[in-house]
Image (cartoon, rainbow, N blue to C red):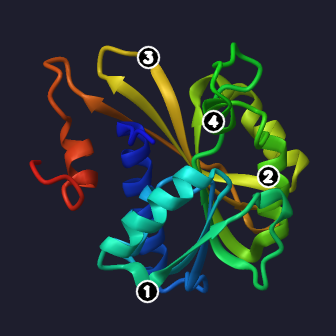
Amino acid sequence: MKVTTDGCLFGAWAAEKIRSSANSGSKLEIQNALDIGSGTGLLSLMIAQQTNTNIDAIEIDKEAYEQGKENIARSSWADKINLIHSDVKEFSGLKQYDAIISNPPFYENELKSASSKKNKAHHDEGLLLEDLLTIIQQNLKSAGEFYLLLPYKRNDEIETCFAKNGLAILHKALVRQSTQHNYFRIMLAGKYEANKKGDFDITEIAIRNEKQVYTNEFIQLLKDYYLYL
């Protein structure tokens, strides 16, 4: 499976959020996390690299699971990641999680690929956003936090979807491919609505500047993961 730049950005952003929560002295101590739709293990590996969190990573696709297992075994953080080959809709965890992360299906209700694997990875055949939010409710601790990467086109409906499921946004980061592009992704941090007070923060980040060079913000987040930044 292809590793995307926005996926890497999200992994670094989520890892920084989790690390900051762990070091903030808050009541939330992130000891365990759930990675929904872990693919080849990218998000889990990035978070394991930066935190002491133990991670259960669930992937439904057999090929991606096998690649993820190989990637994790070759890493320095294999003891912190438990990779599970399963459909998350049938997953019944033995514990609830301090944090849940997911880069879920992007292209609901759009033209589908002829490849069933691509359909599962990118469309609504495998997991709808509503399904994902229900799964978050079922598996997240009462004081826990979740982190999602979503397409910007869903921006107008996100708050309504979350409210229906008793969830609220803490931070929304709007992502551009470059300073000359419109937004195309949203990185979200959230928690249960009952634990959320006041308005949420909104920031933005561009991956590249007008010269198509990585921005300083992107470099600061990814410098611990990319070899040549």
Q: Look at the numbered disc 4 and give the secondary structure of its residue.
A: helix
- Disc 4 packing (10 Å; few <14; some 14–19; many ≥20): some
> Which numbered dot is residue 117?
4
Tag nearer the camera, 1 or 2: 1
Circle 2 residue: 133
Circle 1 residue: 79
Distance from Cα at disc 4 to Cα at disc 1:
29 Å
Circle 3 residue: 182
Q: Nearer the viewer, residue 219 or 126?
A: 126
Residue under the point 14% across and 28% down: 213
Distance from Cα at disc 2 to Cα at disc 4:
22 Å
Tag nearer the camera, 2 or 3: 2
Q: Is residue 121 above or below residue 131?
A: above
Residue under the point 20% across and 35% down: 215
Q: Say what amino acid the circle numbered 2 marks.
A: Leu
Residue under the point 43% across and 86% down: 79
Distance from Cα at disc 3 to Cα at disc 4:
29 Å
Q: Tell which circle, 3 or 4, labels the residue nearer the N-terminal end.
A: 4
Q: Look at the numbered disc 3 and give the secondary structure of its residue.
A: loop
Q: Tell which circle, 2 or 3, labels the residue nearer the N-terminal end.
A: 2
Distance from Cα at disc 1 to Cα at disc 2:
28 Å
